[in-house]
Image (cartoon, grey):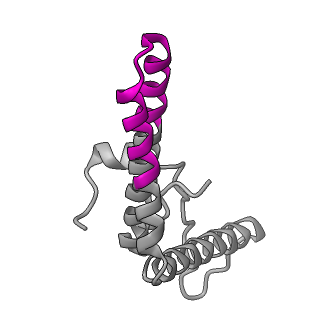
Amino acid sequence: MPNLTDEQKRTFATPLVDVPKQANEGETLTPEEQQAINRANAETQALMQMKAALIETSASRGWFYVEKFAETIVRNLEQAAIAEEDDTKANGLRRDARGARKFKDELFKRIALAKSQEVPNFIEVVTD
């Protein structure tokens, strides 16, 4: 996947982790700077573990079925909305179907995005 555009970064970005300076030779860091470095390293490690887990999960034999189940659920909601004759109920069902479609598309887009990011860019991906 190519690098993200600025618009995509704004959509998927969280507050960036500012990696503090590294100590130059002969220079010592303050305890606060060392804690900030340790915190940034731990966050990067956690994000890389998440990336590895997502890659492993999406490479499993069951991932195809997860995608197929999600698409089937959304399609069934869309078909129920089309088949409904009562306008009030149909409007509610259409709203549900649109929300489900947006959720499914956004979920799989973010999973693909998280799997494709490198360490410097990966920190920007939402991890809530």
Q: Position of residue 25 (x, y in %)?
A: 55, 88
Is residue 38 shown to the viewer in this render?
Answer: yes
Is residue 12 shown to the viewer in this render?
Answer: no
Image vertical order of residue 70 relative to residue 75, above or below: below
Q: Residue at x 43, y 82 (%)?
A: 59
Q: Quadrant of residue 44?
A: bottom right
Q: Nearer the viewer, residue 52 or 80?
A: 80
Q: Residue at x 57, y 66 (%)?
A: 20
Q: Position of residue 22 (x, y in %)?
A: 55, 76
Q: Quadrant of residue 23?
A: bottom right
Q: Nearer the viewer, residue 41 or 47?
A: 47
Residue 128 falls inside the magenta stretch = no
Q: Is the magenta region chiefly helix, strand or loop?
A: helix
Q: Position of residue 113 (x, y in %)?
A: 38, 62
| Highlighted magenta segment, given as a residue range | 72-99
Q: Nearer the viewer, residue 81 or 44?
A: 81
Q: Position of residue 37 (x, y in %)?
A: 64, 72
Q: Residue at x 42, y 69 (%)?
A: 120
Image vertical order of residue 36 relative to residue 93, above or below: below
Q: Residue at x 46, y 79 (%)?
A: 55
Image vertical order of residue 59 relative to residue 14, above or below: below
